[in-house]
Each structure stands twice: as structure tokens, then as C-alpha cells.
Image: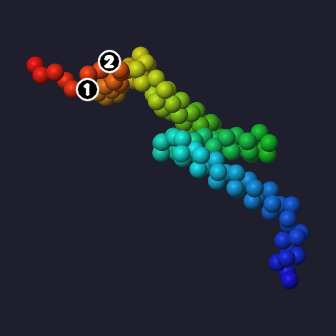
Amino acid sequence: PRIPAALHAWQWYILPNALLAFTLNVLVAATIKEVSAVGFILTGVCKDIFLVLFSWMFFAEEVTVEQLLGFSVTLVGVFSWSYLKVAPESGAVRFAERLLGMPATPQQPTENTPLVKEKV
């Protein structure tokens, strides 16, 4: 008898919470389908940053300088990863590869690339 009464009393809190949880699960599934594992992790990190900044703006939560610095470094990393995926042939990506001592990424094949290398 107590549970149905409590459910009725809290229905306006439970229903929106359940809908929000369902929406979040659908978004997670769609994100996993569309991006790589690293992209999914980076999306989660951006979500965490958004939640902290939202709490800071609307609930007057304290955000320290260290947190802001960490957010900045993280967002630069997310931007860099995204740029690397979008424009792997750009000069900035090539410069970063040389700076880090990474081997240059091979050129992507085109329509005119032979399927078999000719013997020398």
C-alpha cells in the first residue's frame, strides 16, 4: 500500500526522469553507432565539462582555476583529435607528426592508384 501511494505522490518527478534516461540511452546508442570508441569517450568528456559549467552557471557551484585549466586542455585535445580525423593531410597535422617523431601517414588511395605495385 505504501509503494503505490509513494509512486502517485512522486509521479511528476519519476516520469520526466524516466524519459530523460530513455533519451540518454538512445543518444548513447546513436553516438556509438556513428563514431569510434575514442570519439565516444571524447563525447563523454565534453558532456562532463558541460555538466560542470552548467552547474557553475545556474547553481552557483564553485569552479576552480585548475578545473578551468583542465577543461581548456581537454577541449584543445578534443579539437586536435577532431581536426586530425577531418584533415589528416593538412600542414598542421603533418607538422605535429614531425614534431612528435611519428611516421607520416600514408596517402589515401584514389581512383588512379594502381592496385598492385609494379616490379622494379
Where does the image place residue 104, in percent across and percent down from the top left?
31, 24
Q: How many numbered marks, from 0 up?
A: 2
Location of the C terminus (image quadrant): top left
Left or right of 91? Residue 51 is right
> Within 10 Å of the Cα at label 2, are there few (<14), some (14-19), or many (20+) other Cα atoms?
few
Colour theme: rainbow
Whether residue 98 appears in this view of the structure is no
Other-residue count near label 1 (Cα within 10 Å), few / some / many at <14 / 14–19 / ≥20: few
**On screen, residue 84 above or below 70:** above
Q: Are marks 1 and 2 in contact (CB under 8 Å)?
A: no
Horizontal and vertical percent for residue 111?
A: 35, 20
Residue beneath disc 1: 115
Q: Is residue 57 left or right of residue 83?
A: right
Please name whichever residue, 60 or 83, is drawn nearer the observer in this view of the structure: 83
Look at 70% across and 56% down and name the residue there: 21
Q: Depth check: 10 or 48 in front?
A: 10
Q: Position of residue 11 (x, y in %)?
A: 85, 65
Residue drawn at 59 percent across, 50 percent down: 29
Which residue occupies 62% across, 36% down?
Answer: 68
The quarter of the picture where residue 34 lies is top right
* Tag of residue 112: 2
Left or right, 31 with reference to 6: left
Measure how far apart labels 1 and 2 are at the Cα level: 9 Å
Name the amino acid type tagged 1.
Leu
Is residue 91 found left or right of 115 in the rendered image? right
Observer-nearest residue: 16 or 67?
A: 16
Residue 109: percent from the left, percent from the top? 33, 24
**Mark sitting on residue 73:** none
Residue 20 visible? The answer is yes
Q: Amino acid at mark 2?
A: Asn
> Residue 106 is drawn in which quadrant?
top left
